[in-house]
Amino acid sequence: MTREEIFAQLYTGDTVYPPPLESKSALLEITTGCSYRKCKFCDFPKDAFSIASMDVIAHRIELLRLIIGGNPRLHLLGCNPFCLHTRQLLSILSMIRDRLPCVREVSMYARADDVLRKTPEELLMLAQAGLTDLHIGLESGSNAVLSLHEKGETIEDIEAAMDALDNGGIRYHLTAIPGLGGKALSREHALKTAAVISRHRPMSVWCIALKVWPDTPLERMVKEGEFEPLTFEEILREEREMVANIQTKMPTLYVDSTVLNKYTILGMLPEQKDLMLHQMDTLLETGSIA
């Protein structure tokens, strides 16, 4: 069987969406789409949510054995596969442990409410079974922004989920979306997002670009004047204010690989904060992001 034939059976879509920190991870698809599907800024609601059967997952693990090449890290694909019941997740982790012995770390995407549905005992069991990292969509530290986009979670929910993961021994990585508050909530979005990040212990923060996808509620909001998007320069100024106000409790990798068009801002907080701010200032002064 060729690698192309293996990939065709491993992944149902043309494109997979691992976070940048998982660029070298092996990938195993266990769900497709999002279980929530109501965020106004997102185009994933167009895709049906589905869960692969255990037989299909077992078959994909056997296929992955042929190409994994000793990779010690595995990322489970899907918008939020952590929504699965703990029994299902433990079964999947058991199969991974038995059939992919090279794997030492397993990660996946999760919503905060997925975490909160798990008991402290369940989180500990999942950590002991091999789950090491969750990628959680913070998006914004402002409840006003989250409510505007019908995120379905409050900051209090997200912070409670992070506390639960700290107690359960599972690392977490946050995504934030510069510009998500539009012009009306830009400063609140920047400052409150920085405040939430500062209160917790994320391993990384990944800033992703806000795109007005066709046929989404956000596109309608823009057309009807309910949401005024920021320009590239305004997004960079907002992001700079956010980074300037982050006071992390532990070393945190900061990555912006999509927001600033062709530029990537990357560094460790807090020690490289000044360098990243200088890079942003240089982009602003030269007008390079226009």
Image: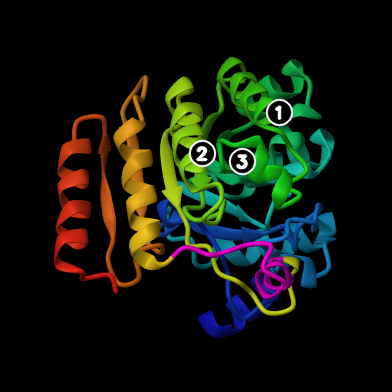
Helix, strand or loop status at disc 3: helix
Query: Mark 3, residues whose alpha carbon is within 10 Å: few (<14), some, or many (≥20)?
Result: some
Question: Can residue 103 be seen?
Answer: no
Location of residue 194 in the rendering, given as x and y in whole percent from the top left corner: 43, 33
Type of residue at label 1?
Answer: Asp
Type of residue at label 3?
Answer: Arg
Q: Who is closer to the viewer here, 160 or 31?
A: 160
Q: Circles 3 and 1: CB distance less than 8 Å?
A: no
**What segment is highlighted magenta in the picture?**
218-230
Which residue is denoted by mark 2 in the rendering?
188
Question: Can residue 15 be seen?
Answer: yes
Compared to residue 92, the image places residue 230 above or below, namely below
Q: CA distance from mark 1 to mark 2?
A: 19 Å
Q: Is residue 224 magenta?
A: yes
Which one is earlier in the sequence, the residue at label 3 or at label 1?
A: 3
Left or right, 50 with reference to 187? right
User: Residue at image x 76%, y 35%?
Assistant: 113
Q: Nearer the viewer, mark 1 or mark 2?
A: 2
Which residue is denoted by mark 1 in the rendering?
157
Q: Nearer the viewer, mark 3 or mark 2?
A: 2
Helix, strand or loop status at disc 2: helix
Image mark for residue 176: none
Which residue is denoted by mark 3 in the rendering?
97
Which one is earlier in the sequence, the residue at label 3 or at label 2?
A: 3
Location of residue 142 in the rendering, given as x and y in whole percent from the top left corner: 59, 37
Q: Who is closer to the viewer here, 200 or 118?
A: 200
